[in-house]
Each structure stands twice: as C-alpha cells, then as structure tokens.
Image (cartoon, rainbow, N blue to C red):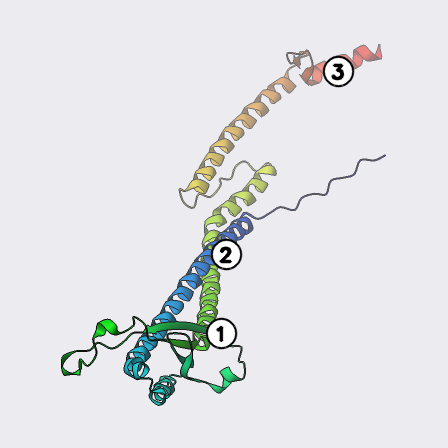
Amino acid sequence: MTAARSRPQRPESLLTRVITSSLVLAGVSITVLTIAFLIAIGAAFETQLRLRARSLADFVASQSEFAMLVGDRVELENIATKAMAGEDVLSVSLTDASGQRLAGAERQATRNGGSERRFETQRDVTPPNSQGLMDWESSKNHPAKIGTVHIALSMKKQDALFERTVSLGLVAAGLSVAALLSVQYFRLRRLLEPLKRLTAFTTEVGAQNLMRKAPVVRLDEVGQLAVAFNRMLEDLAATTVSRDYVDNIIRSMGESLLVVDNTGSIRTANQAALSLLAMASGS
C-alpha cells in the first residue's frame, strides 16, 4: 500500500485573515448593538402608546363622571363617539360598577374582526367631587367606583414606524460595516506592503544574492525585521567569504589534507589527498 499523499495547503493571506476576523468581530458587535437598539426603541414605542391610552382614558373618565352617576346613557354615547375622533382609537366602552355595558363605540374594521394588533387599557370612573352650592349629596354616600372606561388603541402606526426604524438601522449597520472594512482593508494593505517587499527580497537572497540590502521603509515591527535581516546577511556574507578563502587555501596546498568532524567523518579533502587516495586504490 502506498501512503496517501497529503494535499499541499494553500497559503493563507494575512490580510484575508485579519479582514475575516474584523468582519466577524464587527458583525457580532453591530448585531448586539442593533438588538439592544431595537429593544430600547420597542420599549419607547410601547411607553408612548401606554401614555397615550392612559391620557385618553383619564379624559373620557373625567367627562363621564356625572353622566354615569345619573345614568344618562345618551350623554355617555356622545362621549364615547367623540373619543373615537383619534385615528388610532379602535373602540371605547363604558360599563357600570357591575360590568354592564352602558355605552360604547367601535370602528367598522373592529366589528368585522380585524386582526391588527391593539393595545388595551381601562380606567375606573369615580364620583365627581361635590363642592359649594352643588353639594346636594354627601360624598361619603358615593361609591368609590361607579363605572369603568375601556379603550383599545391600534398599534398599526407604531408597528409601521418600528419596521421603518429597523430597516433604516439595518441599512446604517450594513453601511457602517462596509465603510469599516474598506478603511481597514486599505490601511492593512499599506501596513503589509513592506512585509511583501521583504518576502520578495528573501527570494533573491535564496538565489545567493547576498550583496543587496532589504529596504527599510519605516521603523515599526516590519522595519525592525528588515534591519535584523540585513544584519544576518552581513554576517552570512562574511562567513561565506571566510569559508571560500579557507577552501581556496586547502585546494592550493601541495600536501594531502583531510578535514574530519568529531565523529571521524571526512568533511573536506583537497586535490592532493584525492590523488593519493586514487593511487592507493589503484595499487
């Protein structure tokens, strides 16, 4: 069986790795911020709608106090109809203390079973305060609650505004990510350009061109690497010159010379030693 050859790995660009990491980080950050923003906006819209419903319920309750106390259903119907003037008001219902309906009004879409989202609230109606000459009945004899106002508001406008806000937020987030990555891409290309030049220079050094120097563009980490590489080339060139000089001396010697290492292996032999060994093997 022949061992399966491992596929050579394709070189991965440092620029690609940094951009990918930045994209993931920016995506996670913007997603978290967008979710937090949408939660805050949703809470703000809900608070605004709740205040609107409470304000309308308080107004209708204050207008209905006397009519509900004396049982004037016609006046209560007029109050409910006037409360429907707001476009977002779906229904207004007035009930007595026992929960029996006294008056009310609702839109046609609500009667037909419309499915739009709504926000409902209610407000208790208390007896009016009796003061001055109109104190015909002691307030102590009045019940604490004479009825209830029920109001339903449509959330259609809030939902449409929320969807629009979400759309604009997503567009802004996308543009922010694109702008961030564009700036970072060109910035990284500029920062990594000296490293690419140094990489190309090492190829020339591999071709035994030890006389050139690596360009030092700026004194950052890449520049310091180029300076250290130039020092290494100087030492390597000096070592190479010294070795060539010694090799020339050994080759020019008339006496036989063998150079062995600590293990006894022959590392270098001059021409005289080779000739002697050839004569010995021939005899």
At a point 47% along the width and 52% down the height, the residue shown is 188
Q: Which mark, by number, is residue 27?
A: 2
Tell me the residue that label 1 is attached to.
Answer: 117
Q: Amino acid at mark 3?
A: Ser
**In the picture, residue 140 is in which quadrant?**
bottom left
Query: Nearer the N terminus, badge 3 or badge 2?
Result: 2
Tell me the residue that label 3 is attached to.
Answer: 275
Quarter of the image with the N terminus is: top right
Label 3 element class: helix
Q: Amino acid at mark 1?
A: Arg
Label 2 element class: helix
Viewer-proximal residue among 178 and 145: 145
- How far, Cα to Cα, is label 3 from label 2? 75 Å
Q: Amino acid at mark 2?
A: Gly
Q: Look at the image and tell me whether residue 123 can be seen.
A: yes
Q: How dense is the environment of label 3, judged by Cα within 10 Å: few (below 14), some, or many (20 and up)?
A: few
Query: Nearer the N terminus, badge 1 or badge 2?
Result: 2
